[in-house]
Image (tube, grey):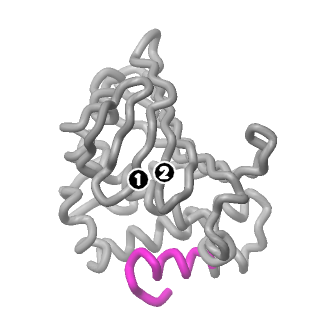
Amino acid sequence: MVDIQNQLSAVTRGLSFEDRDGEPAHVQTLEQTYPAGLADVWEAVTTPERIARWFLPITGDLRLGGQYQLEGNAAGTVLECAPPAEGTARYRITWEFGGDVSWVTVRLAAEDDSTRFTLEHVARAADLPEGMWNTYGPGATGVGWDGGLLGLGLHLGAVEGSLSPQEAEAWAVTDEGKRFYRGAADGWAAAQVAAGADPAVAARAADATYGFYTGSDA
């Protein structure tokens, strides 16, 4: 059993539309505070052995300028890498999948004995697959990241329960998994409305996203 509601409530989701390098871009953010020190969280999100325990197996050179490959998922290049210093840390990578390139930045900030984790995913509007945004809205990628934060939360003791990355696909179609994906999709619908979308449009996108991740009707 996983404490679904606690995890969903612990994540702050944001959506904005900005110009990045002169091009329109969609910017999604997720933020959660974990009950672990900065050094521990940094190790959890930057070392292959730890990443595989909560996300996916990863290979490559996880240093500045190095390239990585997530098993069955994205590859990319490490563009920035700033290890813990004076209470903060960050890294920035390209996220290359399906022929498209976007950018992910992870920022960490120490807060007493805890660490605030912020993930930003930037995608150029022109690079989004045709029809993807109109159908799924921000949930298409956002819900996937919600799953990553759930894995990290379980790994770091922020949420009660047990779920290995190898179990995640089968878990998605259980009643518990469906509750999680329903809540995450609705969370991204709320972020979409806050960014100016019509509530009915955001609700339809959330339903489509939920169906995509679980193979279920709304």
| Placement of the N terminus among the 4 image quadrants | bottom left
Residue 39, percent from left and from top: 31, 21
Q: Name the disc covering residue 181, or none.
A: none
Q: How many marks?
A: 2
Place residue 38 in its image quadrant.
top left
Badge 2 vs badge 1, beta-carbon distance below 8 Å? yes
Mark 2 and mark 1: Cα distance apart in space: 5 Å
| Picture layout, residue 111 above or below residue 141 | above
Which residues, given as a range, are shown in magenta? 205-218
Tell me what residue is drawn at x 26 percent, y 65 percent.
168
**Left or right of 58, for residue 140:** right
Q: Is residue 12 placed above or below 200 in the rendered structure?
A: above
Task: Using the rendered image of the protein, determine whether residue 173 is visible from the camera's viewpoint.
Answer: yes
How many residues crowd around disc 2 within 10 Å: few (fewer than 14), some, or many (20 or more)?
some
Question: Taking 180 as reference, is 200 left or right?
Answer: right
Residue 170: % across, % down? 23, 74
Q: Which residue is mark 2?
A: 96
The residue to which callout 1 is attached is 74
- Residue type beneath disc 2: Glu
Residue 70 or 163: which is nearer the viewer?
A: 70
